[in-house]
Image (tube, rainbow, N blue to C red):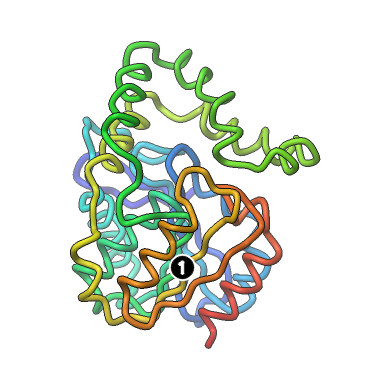
């Protein structure tokens, strides 16, 4: 698998689609890896050179000392684009990936074309949510990651999807259980500390905000805040919980692709 050598370790990435197509960069959610986007690749790769990667602390990428920051993750993205000689790209990020997209829109807009912010918020939850989770995972290690599976099911998926698509649910929960406890805790801190609410007014890029109508983590109200804060942003709502690209895969892929090709 291809990797980018960063100063403190390797960043794992994957490319799909025509060599001469516009680049679409996909950024995963907390606790998953680049395979969370498998359902989107058949359609996206028809029209784009799709670049996806395992965020630092996830999958096959480096697990460096934490805590991490969203800026650090965004600079990893820019380093990856530079190494692959990609001057500009479309960007689609979900949850933590959406926070990375917000940092890039605010601080590196010249590197982006269109942006899709999925199941995310200007600020996701509070330290009261994140700190106990960080402490538990660091204390319990892999057992702590396994313990997150049960509670995460209802955050990531609607009850109906969990009941009818157990294989899909298990595939994503396995990604969580296999995530490095050190990397997961460091990424929880990155999400905890991110707050872009006061900076989004400067964004001038075409933006689509994707919400899930059953998402208990980043609600429709969070999505509406992003739409109102970003000039000209569009919003769409899917019948899904937090991982809308998995639960509403066909609708997600079709509507995101249509926005990016507009």
Find residue 8 and report its horizontal and vertical position in percent. Answer: 21, 40
Relative side of 36 to 165, left or right: left
In screen coordinates, is 170 left or right of 199?
right
Callout count: 1
Q: Residue furthest right?
A: 164
- Few, some or many C-alpha atoms within 10 Å of disc 1 (few <14, some 14-19, many ≥20)? many
Q: Residue 76: which quarter of the image? A: bottom left
Relative vertical location of residue 208 with respect to residue 241 in this rendering, above or below: below
Q: Position of residue 74 (x, y in %)?
A: 27, 57
Reply above or below: 243 against 255.
above
Q: In the image, 223: left or right of 194? A: right
Query: Would residue 212 be found to the left or right of residue 159 on screen?
Result: left
Which residue: 53% across, 26% down?
177
Q: Residue furthest bottom?
A: 262
The structure residue drawn at horizontal position 51% and vertical position 72%, both measured from the top left corner, is: 49
On the image, numbered disc 1 is attached to which residue? 209
In the image, 173 versus 123, the foreground residue is 123
Where, by quadrant of the figure, is residue 68 drawn?
Answer: top left
User: Helix, strand, or loop for circle 1?
Assistant: strand
Q: Position of residue 146 (x, y in %)?
A: 53, 19
Q: Position of residue 62 (x, y in %)?
A: 33, 38
Residue at 59% x, 80% y: name it: 258
Q: Extreme front residue here? A: 221
């Amino acid at each position: 698998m291809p990797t980018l050598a960063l100063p403190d370790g390797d960043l794992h990435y994957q490319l799909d689609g025509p060599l001469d197509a516009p680049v679409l960069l996909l950024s995963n959610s907390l606790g998953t890896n680049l395979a969370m986007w498998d359902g989107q690749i058949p359609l996206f790769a028809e029209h784009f050179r799709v670049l996806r990667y395992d965020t630092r602390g996830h999958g096959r990428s480096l697990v460096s000392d934490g805590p991490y920051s969203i800026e650090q993750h965004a600079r990893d993205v820019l380093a990856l684009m530079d190494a692959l000689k990609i001057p500009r790209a479309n960007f689609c990020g979900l949850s933590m990936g959406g926070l990375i997209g917000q940092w890039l829109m605010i601080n590196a807009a010249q590197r982006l074309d269109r942006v899709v912010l999925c199941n995310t918020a200007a600020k996701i939850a509070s330290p009261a949510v994140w700190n106990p989770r960080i402490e538990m995972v660091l204390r319990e290690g892999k057992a702590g990651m396994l313990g997150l599976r049960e509670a995460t099911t209802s955050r990531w998926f609607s009850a109906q999807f969990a009941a009818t698509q157990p294989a899909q649910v298990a595939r994503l929960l396995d990604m969580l259980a296999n995530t490095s406890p050190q990397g997961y805790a460091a990424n929880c801190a990155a999400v905890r500390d991110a707050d872009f609410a006061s900076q989004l007014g400067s964004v001038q890029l075409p933006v689509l905000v994707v919400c899930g109508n059953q998402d208990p983590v980043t609600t429709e109200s969070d999505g509406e805040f992003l739409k109102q804060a970003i000039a000209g942003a569009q919003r769409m709502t899917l019948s899904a919980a937090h991982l809308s690209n998995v639960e509403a895969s066909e609708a997600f892929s079709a509507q995101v692709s249509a926005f990016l090709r507009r």
